[in-house]
Image (tube, helix red, strand yellow):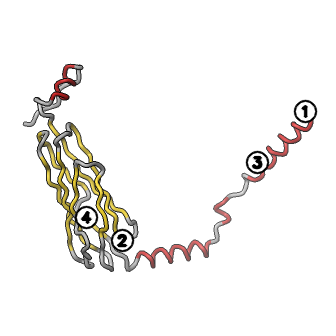
């Protein structure tokens, strides 16, 4: 019992005294300044993508219709912009981007996306992730809107029978 008390006391003492040190006091200001300078130099000279808007709202469409989204951008960086990949959050949205093309500084470009509402209903929020040679490396754009369910859709009718309230219709 005495050994157990001593061991607990030692562990408690070590934990109390080791937590008193403030980690921010250990940071060397010279190293911090060097790291900030290094990062700012690294950012200079890279490509930078600036979108007119990262969000596209297609409004309200009927189930089964397709909505075309267009995202316009400019390379506001100092080197050529390369978009190596564009991947959507689901198969209902298909992106089209300038593949194998260098977008020069100051040059404009566009990314198109087609949202297919065939098996979708109600509020929709989809994302498209772009892999680029910018400082961030990844940019995300969004397609959103509302899909009015097809009243002849059997799943929709089953939900109504279960007590799920009707979705507002197009005006």
Q: Residue at x 22, y 69 (%)?
A: 98
Residue at point 17%, 40% (across, down): 147
User: Residues at badges 2 and 4 in contact (C-beta under 8 Å)?
Assistant: no
Q: Quadrant of residue 129?
A: bottom left
Rounded to the nearest angstrom, the CA distance separating label 2 from label 4 is: 15 Å
Looking at the picture, tell me which residue is in the foreground, 57 or 153.
Answer: 153
Q: Earlier in the sequence, mark 3 or mark 2?
A: 3
Query: Residue 1's mark?
Result: 1
SS of the residue under disc 4 = strand
CA distance for labels 3 and 4: 51 Å
Categorize mark 2 by other alpha carbons within 10 Å: few (<14), some (14-19), many (20+).
some
- Quadrant containing the C terminus in the rendered view: top left
Residue 114's place in the image compared with 131, above or below, is: above
Sequence-earlier tag: 3 or 4: 3
Which mark is nearer the camera, 2 or 4?
2
The secondary structure type at the circle numbered 1 is loop
Which one is earlier in the sequence, the residue at label 2 or at label 1? 1
Mark closest to the chain's N terminus, 2 or 4: 4
Report the Cα–Cα distance between label 4 and label 1.
Answer: 69 Å
Q: Which residue is mark 4?
A: 51
Few, some or many residues within 10 Å of mark 4 (<14, 14–19, 20+): some
When the figure is inspected, residue 171 is found, relative to residue 102, above or below; the finding is above
Q: Residue furthest right?
A: 2
Query: Mark 2 — residue?
Result: 133
N-term-proximal mark, 1 vs 3: 1
Q: Which residue is mark 3?
A: 15
Q: Residue 4 location, x and y as percent?
A: 87, 37
């Amino acid at each position: 019992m005495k050994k157990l008390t001593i061991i607990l006391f030692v562990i408690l003492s070590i934990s109390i005294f080791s937590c008193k040190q403030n980690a921010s006091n250990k940071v060397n200001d010279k190293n911090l300044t060097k790291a900030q300078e290094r990062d700012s130099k690294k950012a200079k000279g890279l490509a930078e993508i600036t979108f007119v808007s990262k969000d596209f709202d297609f409004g309200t469409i009927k189930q089964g219709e397709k909505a075309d989204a267009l995202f316009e951008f400019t390379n506001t960086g100092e080197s050529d912009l390369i978009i190596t990949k564009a991947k959507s959050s689901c198969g209902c949205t298909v992106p089209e981007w300038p593949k194998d093309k260098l977008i020069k500084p100051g040059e404009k470009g566009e990314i198109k996306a087609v949202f297919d509402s065939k098996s979708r209903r109600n509020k929709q929020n989809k994302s498209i992730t772009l892999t680029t040679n910018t400082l961030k490396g990844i940019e995300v754009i969004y397609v959103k809107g509302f899909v009015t369910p097809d009243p002849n859709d059997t799943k929709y009718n089953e939900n109504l029978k279960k007590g799920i309230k009707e979705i507002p219709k197009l005006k």
